[in-house]
Image (cartoon, rainbow, N blue to C red):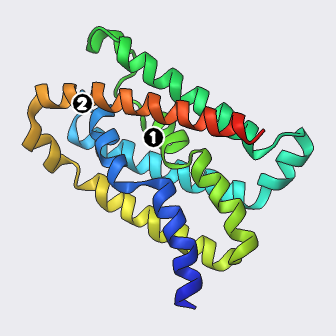
Amino acid sequence: MIEKFLLAFIPLFVAIDPIGLVALFVGLGTSASPENRRHQAFLGIFTSLCVAIGFIFLGKIIFAALGITVSDFQVAGGLILLCLAVRELVALGPHDRGSGDEFGIVPLGMPLIAGPALLTALLILIDSVGLIYTLASLLVNLAIVAFALCNSERFTRWMGKQGLRGVSKLIALLLAAIAISLIRRGWQTH
């Protein structure tokens, strides 16, 4: 029983990457108040939970109905992440960011938490370990993400405003690299 849970937990932990999400979250929320950051974290986790559960039950049906593959999904997710990263990298300042305080649903909930890696892993895990273990490991991973995001303020106090701006740009560059990796992998397996 524990073995099946771990077989589901570990790939989802890697796909979600709670540690990396904290850095992304801090970078995304540089101009947001602590209360708004907590609200955006809740929105992101709730959105990713809804998307993941919906995908667990409807993913294969949607893919079959639309005639798309997991590779197509990786390329599309990678392109979205790349657009978000480029927008952050070329922004000249806070006034150019538009709704920079609203990031909980997009990009945090989808595609950062519930991105192509997580959704693909969910489809594979349901077939290999079953629905119950997959759902349980998803919930535990999202609880870890919630804990990590709720404690992200410590990073904010430690780094300061200039440090957060630097982290924001670095994270946007890393996000662009992740996006290119998703596109490349989707293209190679297509």
Which residue is the site of mark 2?
A: 30
Q: Secondary structure at mark 1?
A: helix
Q: Quadrant of the C terminus?
A: top right
Up the image or down, 20 lies above or below 132; here it is above
| Side (left or right) of 174 relative to 27 | right
| Residue type beneath disc 1 | Leu
- x, y (%) of residue 188? 70, 37
Which quadrant of the structure image shows residue 98? top left
Q: Is disc 1 in contact with disc 2, using a CB cutoff of under 8 Å?
A: no
Label 1 Cα crowd, 10 Å radius (few <14 / some 14-19 / many 20+): many
Which quadrant of the structure image shows residue 146? bottom left
- x, y (%) of residue 169? 29, 24
Which residue is the site of mark 1?
A: 108
| Residue type beneath disc 2 | Thr
Q: As rendered, which of 12 and 185 lies closer to the eye?
A: 185
| Side (left or right) of 81 relative to 174 | right
Up the image or down, 13 lies above or below 29; here it is below
Label 2 Cα crowd, 10 Å radius (few <14 / some 14-19 / many 20+): many
Report how far apart the C-alphas of labels 1 and 2 lie in the structure: 14 Å
| Side (left or right) of 90 relative to 33 | right
Up the image or down, 169 lies above or below 15; here it is above
Q: Residue at x 29, y 10 (%)?
A: 95
